[in-house]
Image (cartoon, helix red, strand yellow):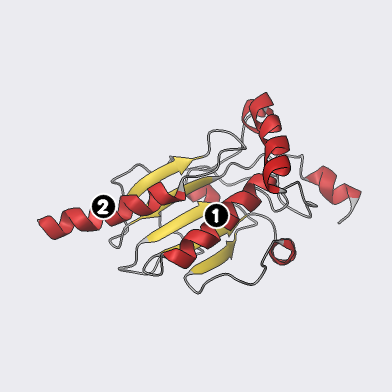
Amino acid sequence: MTFQQELNSWWSPSAPPPTAELPQVGSKAPDTPKLQLEPGRKTIITFLRHCGCPFAEKTFLNLREVAKNQKSLDFIAVSHSDEASTNAWLRSLPQAGSEPENLRIVVDDKIEIYAAWGLGTASFAHTLSPWSMYSVWKLGRTEGIWNRPTESGSRWQTAGTYAVDGDGIVRWSAPAQRADDIPDLEAAVRSVENETKREAKL
């Protein structure tokens, strides 16, 4: 990692694709060639902030643990850092290589999938709010999760998490409201489990 790489992460994504409307609960999930969902499988999709961000690390570690306990669901983490940087970041995490088979990582360094799912460039307040800065310190002090080197990706790219049922319908939508917004993955899981229970009663 070089100083220039770290500096580049503070620039907004160059020439980003047009950002679509955010998927609404009850709507069909966006269909993109780079992110294919398994037909008939319920899926939790998390779009990460840049690799090196402590909130991206916390989100991924949570996703990995939930995936281990929910074998009947698919889990996808989408990274907008490039493949080499994403892989280097994954190797640096605690218990690296312990990802279960139902969790896969998709690299989207052109942010085409992010844009299709309504996730564009963040505002100054979203990225650098006092609450987010405090959360960085708190996460480091309480859980030992600090900033790691940022080799690629933008700190201004927004994150978000979605739950999609087996028919490809969005059942839970949580675009990040601030940089420190950690998704409630258990709520995402419940949203597709509850949909299955409702269908069973019909």
Q: CA distance from mark 2 to mark 1?
A: 21 Å
* Rendering coords of residue 77 (x, y %): 54, 59
Residue type marked 1:
Asn
* Rendering coords of residue 96 (x, y %): 67, 68
* Rendering coords of residue 56 (x, y %): 63, 49
Based on the displayed image, in which of its 4 quarters is residue 169 positioned? bottom left
Based on the displayed image, in which of its 4 quarters is residue 130 positioned? top right
For mark 2, give the secondary structure: helix
Residue type marked 2:
Asn
For mark 1, give the secondary structure: helix
Looking at the image, is 123 positioned above or below residue 9? above
Instruction: Tell me if residue 51 can be seen.
Output: yes
In this view of the protein, which residue sits in the foreground, 135 or 28? Answer: 135
In the image, 140: left or right of 183? right
* Rendering coords of residue 80 (x, y %): 64, 54
Based on the displayed image, in which of its 4 quarters is residue 87 positioned? bottom right
Which is more N-terminal, label 1 or label 2? 1
- Per the rendering, the mark at residue 194 is 2
Image quarter hosting the N terminus: bottom right
Residue linked to disc 1: 62
Residue plotted at (75% across, 46% down): 146
Residue plotted at (76% across, 45% down): 9
Which residue in the rendered view is the most extreme toward the right?
Answer: 3
Q: Residues within 10 Å of mark 1 (few under 14, many from 20)?
A: some
Looking at the image, is 111 positioned above or below residue 74? above
Residue plotted at (62% across, 45% down): 16
Q: Residues within 10 Å of mark 2 (few under 14, many from 20)?
A: few
Residue plotted at (56% across, 44% down): 159
In this view of the protein, which residue sits in the foreground, 82 or 73? Answer: 73
